[in-house]
Amino acid sequence: MQGIELSRGFYTDIVRPWLSEAAPELRYSAALIGYGSELIGFDDEVSKDHNWGPRVHILLSRDDFGNCARRLVDEFSKFAPADYLGEPIGWRSRPHPASNSVEAAGALGHGLEFHTLEALLEGHFAVRSVENLNALQWLGFAEQKLLAFTSGAVFHDDDSRLSQARDRLGYFPEDVWLYKIACQWRRIAEEQAFVGRAGQVGDDLGSRVIAARLVRDVMRMGFLLERRYAPYSKWLGSSFARLPIAEALSPHLKRALHSNAWTEREDALAWAYLELAHRQNAIGIASFEPIVGPYHDRPFTTINADDAVETTCSAIADASIRQLPIVGSLDQVSDLTPLLEDAKLSQRMMSQLRS
């Protein structure tokens, strides 16, 4: 059984009937969101060594949390069975311990946690509301955290606040999306000629490393063009394979990684860039005429990525976004996990784009 369905059953069979007796007037949301391979359907036997199992997040108003959350955690500890469908409900302590803070309460003995929505948003994104988010806040949200918050499952939602927050965070606003696409083309533009240049001087390892970086950039552009959040690196390839564009891109990307000659690598990548350009033109945003050819007067096969950057930027309606340096969002400027996971640090770093 996949983790989502295990937790859904845990809520339906154990938590919901108990809550209806322990706090019959309580209005709440119940969900499994925030972290875990099961949120995107990639959990397996290996996943069971950390935090996998029957677990449910209960979201309360701030008043209700203060009035009853910690009492309910203690009472559930006395009521809960030792296991559910053969899986122990005791906390698997790596890497996320049971929540306990000003607006979060949990226990090591079971997988039931209580939170406020505001605290959950603050922990994930360093905001306490998703109303009126500005562009720089969006650019400071890690895609893997957006995916974790909007994936998973909501089992119950009395006031719809959780569902509304997930809907608002469902994908980037149009102009932020266009900015990210322009910046992704800029990443490709910066290194695409280096596959050939490194190979030309006999640096086969360097050429392969650059090609691999560009393969990753192409994959992440695929997520952008399909309007899907990209997961963290462990599941990037598995998630990419599910994208509609993957069928066209994957043969070129595999050839780029497997080729023993730098000329074959850059040719395979050029075909991948063409597929991205065709997809961008097909969805009707910031269309440009893709041209594959030599890099200025050097014999390296590239695409006119600078034209893609310029055209995409010109499609941005919001002048404040259009005037930002073509640097990128949080995940485009760093893949450092401690940064991506620290929402407050992420926001502080991206705020520097203003200057």
Image: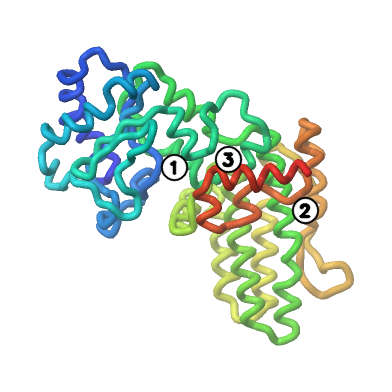
Residue 60 spot, x, y in % from top left = 35, 23
Q: Nearer the viewer, residue 162 or 79?
A: 79
Q: Nearer the viewer, residue 349 or 247?
A: 349
Q: Residue furthest bottom?
A: 202
Residue under circle 1?
Answer: 148
Whichever of callouts 1 and 2 sits on the residue coming sooner in the sequence is: 1
Packing grade of label 1 (10 A; few <14, some 14-19, many >=20) is many
Whichever of callouts 2 and 3 sits on the residue coming sooner in the sequence is: 3
Residue under circle 2?
Answer: 290
Which of label 3 and label 1 is nearer to you?
1
SS at badge 3: loop
Q: Residue furthest right?
A: 297
Question: Marks 1 and 3: in contact by CB < 8 Å?
Answer: no
Please identify the quarter of the rendering in which residue 186 is found. bottom right
Amino acid type at circle 1 is: Ala
Residue under circle 3?
Answer: 227
150 sits to left or right of 137: left
Amino acid type at circle 2 is: Pro
Who's the residue at 24% across and 46% down the image?
Answer: 53
Packing grade of label 3 (10 A; few <14, some 14-19, many >=20) is some
What is the CA distance from the residue labelled 2 to the residue labelled 3?
21 Å
SS at badge 2: loop
Please identify the quarter of the rendering in which residue 15 is found. top left
Who's the residue at 68% across and 52% down the image?
Answer: 184
Q: Which mark is residue 293?
A: none
Q: Nearer the viewer, residue 42 or 140?
A: 140
